Amino acid sequence: MRKWLWAILGLIGLAIVAFFAFAPGILESRTNKIDGKPLLPVSAEAKALHKTLRIVDLHSDTLMWKRDILKRADRGHEDLPRLQQGNVTLQLLSSVTKSPRGQNYDGNTGETDNITPLVIAQLQPPRTWFSLTERSLYHAEKLDRAVANSNDRLLKVQDATSLDSLLARRNGNSLPVGAMLTIEGLQNLEGRIENLDKLYDAGFRMAGLTHFFDNELSGSMHGVDKGGLTPLGRQVIRRMEDKGMLVDVAHISHKALAEVIAIARRPVVSSHGGVQAICKTNRNLSDDEIRGVARTGGLIGIGYWDGALCGTDPRIAARSMKHVRDLVGIQHVALGSDYDGATTVRFDTSHLEQITQALLDEGFTQQEIHAVMGENALRVLRAGIQPL
């Protein structure tokens, strides 16, 4: 009887070990997908042009997953080897701290959370299990460890000096990739504005007010009430601008977006999404909202995933960028992939030549392609991370 008991306990132990070892990877493989449809043929002109670009991607969620960003993975959309292959200069890495079950674009509450079981299954430190602030601080530590172990292949960018250093290094023989920390929803403040200082000190330089549900700062475009800014939200925006943190309006309610634009003293960024003129969902920006972001001197980051484009063809992304260009000017167009953000895409970051080719096919000039692929973002980021 005792032998049977030990055998059963051993099997249970093996099952637990197997769960923690394999479940996070299985979940990611089922969540971050490549659709497998044919890629665009890439011309010699596009390949040559792509090598000259300084590419900036305003949004990815790679830090959320349990894998070494320094090593090429057989799942997900990006890691350092694939960023290097795609000729990316600077990748903005978002901290995702909470996501509702049954997540959808139309209406969610903050009563449930998919991230907590993921955090536990990944065996993150217990301090992160029930604190959203600590989850973001852990993501910052994760990036810092990667930078320290990268042999200068990955550089953290958090001010003009580190940005200049990155660009100077890429003008030489080595091609390091820069990484800047951002936040997907300031629910990680846990209602306390002083936590913004902790996040800033950890290196976060851009933050969205909400994610998929209404919080203490603002309504979300995917929330229940979809209201405007709260007094705390207005206070946080003011402090972010003072400190040198860009305000990201992706995911906030349409009412709150109008209010942010009205009070903004610095350029605001819609880091990842699409345009309703091409893909009419409430996730995407209307023409009036695009004009509003442009009035602040800000950026519209266009994604490549199905929810932003109503498809995954890179030519749809290029048409979305063309719409923004024609509406408000080329200086307001940027890239915002949403890689590794529970998205389905046509190509991972190693195949960013797909966007270069699609832009050429849509008639963009080489100068315009340089602007879209990174120069616009470098200009706005440099200005936005300087304290007032």
Image: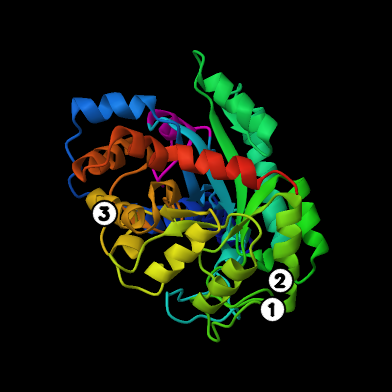
Q: How busy is the neighbourhood of tag 1: few (under 14 within 10 Å), some, or many (20 plus)? A: some
Q: Nearer the viewer, residue 104 or 27?
A: 104
Residue found at the very far top of the displayed protein: 173
Q: Position of residue 171 (x, y in %)?
A: 51, 18
Measure how far apart labels 1 and 2 are at the Cα level.
6 Å
The residue carrying mark 1 is 230
Q: What amino acid is found at the position of numbered circle 2 in the picture? A: Arg
From the viewer's perspective, is residue 362 above or below residue 251? Answer: above
Q: What amino acid is found at the position of numbered circle 1 in the picture? A: Thr
SS under mark 2 = helix
From the viewer's perspective, is residue 136 above or below residue 167? Answer: below
Q: Is residue 6 visible?
A: no
Predominant secondary structure, magenta span = loop
The residue carrying mark 3 is 319
Q: Nearer the viewer, residue 261 or 99?
A: 261
Asked whether the residues under the numbered discs 2 and 3 touch, taking CB atoms below 8 Å apart as contact, a structural biologist would say: no
Q: Which mark is residue 39?
A: none
Q: Give, as a single range, the part of the protein colored magenta.
A: 70-85
The residue carrying mark 2 is 234
Q: Position of residue 63 (x, y in %)?
A: 56, 48
Magenta segment includes 163: no
Asked whether the residues under the numbered discs 1 and 2 touch, taking CB atoms below 8 Å apart as contact, a structural biologist would say: yes
